[in-house]
Image: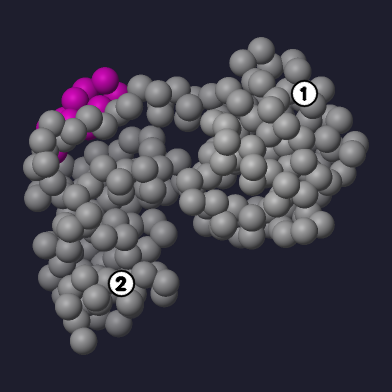
Amino acid sequence: MNCIIIEDEIPAQRILKSYIEKVSYLELRGTFNAALKAYDILNSEKIDLIFLDINLPDISGLSFLRTLKNPPTIIMTTAYPDYAVESFEFETIIDYLVKPFSLERFLKAIQKTQRLQTKTVEKPIEKLSPETLFLNVDKTFYKIQFQDIFYVESERNYLTLVSKQQKLSFIGALRTWKEKLPEQQFIQIHKSFVINKDHVDKITGNEVYIHDKRIPIGRTFKAKLFEVLDIT
């Protein structure tokens, strides 16, 4: 697993390097004291994991993360635990290490990352045709018709797919799952929801109703939703 460190404090860099050396499947590809210096390696190499400090000299870690189109898995590091709540808006942040952190705490974060990487490699979703896919949930494969999906909801590292027939929960990222769905039929309306526009019953204020389920509309998604539904 290729990783990089973005951390401006030398002692913290040293600790991370020493911990990384103890994990055989981690390969450190670079260490940077400012976020913007990491762009080149992120564009030229496959980086699976970033140890990212929040307080950096050029741009904050969270602001930097917002600039990445397809960010890898992130483990945040900071001396300020108050930032933890803000960081939850990012699906790719797998854990949050508050300095100073022990080797045991570091290893717990890495194990969490490894489990997520393993699930990704297993490719739980395989398309059969433009109308159908199989979804692997706990080694049981469910055949899903796109037209039957009501919505997909994200909660931390888990997704819940609700359709006419069933409700299925599994590990995954909403961003990745959205790419599997027909873009002419599905639209993201909130950081935690992708919906099937064909099942929208009504819109009231900042909520969409799909078969009695109230789904919030995120402020940044509302204009696009109204455009797709041709609402003026």
Provide the secondary structure element on which disc 2 rests.
helix
Mark number, residue 45: none
On the picture, is 232 further left or further right than 59?
A: left
Q: Which residue is mark 1?
A: 19
Q: Amino acid at mark 2?
A: Lys
Query: Image height check: is 112 above or below 75?
Result: above
Query: Image height check: is 115 above or below 193?
Result: above
> What residue is at 85 percent from the left and 37 percent from the top?
12
Name the image quarter holding residue 128: top left
Give the x, y percent position of residue 41: 64, 37
- Rate crowding at label 2 as few (under 14), some (14 to 19) or many (20 or more) other CA atoms within 10 Å: few
Which residues are drawn in magenta?
Answer: 134-145
> What residue is at 32 percent from the left and 65 percent from the top?
189
Give the x, y percent position of residue 175: 38, 48
On the picture, is 155 further left or further right than 107?
A: left
Name the image quarter holding residue 82: bottom right
Give the x, y percent position of residue 228: 21, 71
Give the x, y percent position of residue 208: 24, 71
Q: Earlier in the sequence, mark 1 or mark 2?
A: 1
Mark number, residue 224: 2
- Quadrant assignment for the C terminus: bottom left
> What residue is at 41 percent from the left and 74 percent from the top?
219
State the CA–CA distance, disc 1 to disc 2: 44 Å
Q: Answer whether labels 1 and 2 touch (C-beta < 8 Å).
A: no
Q: Chief secondary structure of the magenta span?
A: strand
Magenta residue check for 62 = no
On the picture, is 26 further left or further right than 172?
A: right
Name the foreground residue: 16 vs 139. Answer: 16
Provide the secondary structure element on which disc 1 rests.
helix
